[in-house]
Image: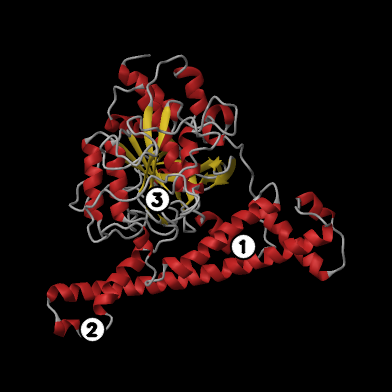
Amino acid sequence: MRGRFYFLIALLISLHFYGVCQSIPNSKPPKDWFLKDPDADQLLGLSVERAYHSLLKDKPAKTVIVAVVDTGVDIDHEDLKNVIWVNEDEIPDNGVDDDKNGYVDDVNGWNFIGGKNGNINEDTYEITREYARLRRKFENNSQPEVNAGKKSNEEYKRYQEYKRKWQEKREEDFTQYQLIKQIYENLIFSLDTLKKFLKSDTISEAQLQSITSSDPTILFAKGYLIKFFTNLEEDTFQEKFEELKDAYETSKSAYELSADPDFEPRTIVGDNYSDPTEKYYGNNYVKPMSGPVADHGTHVAGIIAASRDNNLGIKGIADHVKIMVIRAVPNGDERDKDIANAIYYAVNNGARIINLSCGKNESPQKDVVDKAVQYAELKGVLIVHAAGNESVDNDKVMNYPTAIYKNGGEAKNWISVGASGWGGNNFIGSFSNYGKKSVDVFAPGVAIYSTVPGQRYKNYDGTSMACPAVAGVAAMLMAYFPEFSSTEIKNIILESVRTFENKVQIPGTKTIGEFEQLSKTGGIVNAYEAVQLALKKRGEK
């Protein structure tokens, strides 16, 4: 899974290059800005509240199951526990496959990255796996063109290409890790120094500003933390420090494990990995306390369906939803086999929408994923996918899985989503991928406040957040307009976007361009406009 802490890491690196003494002016939007209305609130939200309070008021709705294919979900979270899907045909913890679906005790979903003896946490990049596979064949064969036929020669060329990509990625990871390590260690030093000086376990901005000292060590620590605090805009240094610690550990893991061709965690699962069509493996452990921490998946689930009527935390987008939890995404790149099986599981167990907030640059078993996507299309299940967080044009750089099949066809049940902001200087996520041919639409994905494990809430940035924003709107439409097919729901969402004539800085470049040129629709999803169009198509005024 690329991008879990991508935005934070990128910002930290920018602070290193431009100096912590530089300040990045920014304003904080309301925590629920993504639910707001562009006209009434002057925020580029989804107009969710406006839709509920007017067009959908007192209208009947049916429950829609949304599968969150991710790192897992905290199913006991105060804002999610009432919206978690329950497999009524399965008796909990009896060790029997009561519903005969091939998965034992799958009460709330399934985990494809675990086995009898535990769960995968870190995994390798797909580039690393392909390099390692081909290295075993060619590392000691310096003249494959002499010792093998044409097919082997082609494989050898791929080996050389993967080796080059792997080396580049490893060097990139090492550089990133060293930069974050330096910032992390400086912050630890500064925090520890000032906590001792202030005789306090926490530090606020007010406390920092009040410090007077001629000691250069104290002054360095004060200046470092003031600029860190200002740039990252958090209520306390401790909260942001915890996020930095996560980013540091993620970058450390990426360098030490994800790019290590000798690291092989798959034995934990116990499947026959050489068989990409194998389905019945894993465990029912959907709430991870080991394996990849469920922050990402829990955050995604909250955006879609956090309880809207419990006066706690946040309101999700859709009010008649059950979240099916499917774990298939580790810290590292998800595997094609697991994504394909996650799609099959979701479709076969009643999901109408599948949220895929994940992605990678290589897909060696793409045909397996394609077949699963085609199956979902055949069964009328909508797939919503995050465009990616690398600030690149997806028309030029592949981001898998993709709507384009290996045979050149295109899935009709697929929406690819880029990340937009709340307006002004934050119109578009600077990290977001884009593509006039490959990205369908943009949706709120900057400073999105949602659920994380342990009854907590956090702001995250990413197309991983924009993706469930669209999945949530799709679920709202399916709940109130159950007569429409998934393709019709997709078309309603795309036909009702709000378009803007804004010029924006194209992500990853210094070029200023038209926002409408960054996606197929050129717009941002809007729930109010979508509901209005759905009513019109139904024949209501």
Residue 451 appears at what percent x and percent y? 54, 40
**Residue 496, visible in the rendered structure:** no
Distance (Cα) linking label 2 and label 3: 36 Å
Residue 452 appears at what percent x and percent y? 54, 43
Residue that badge 2 annotates? 141
Residue that badge 1 annotates? 15
Residue 9 appears at what percent x and percent y? 54, 59
- In the shown orientation, is residue 334 left or right of residue 292? left
Relative to 508, say whether 502 is above or below. above
- In the shown orientation, is residue 86 left or right of residue 426? left
SS label for mark 1: helix
Q: Quadrant of the N terminus?
A: bottom left
Q: Quadrant of the C terminus?
A: top left
SS label for mark 2: loop
- In the shown orientation, is residue 385 left or right of residue 139? right
Residue that badge 3 annotates? 358
Q: Residue at x 76, y 54 (%)?
A: 201
SS label for mark 3: loop
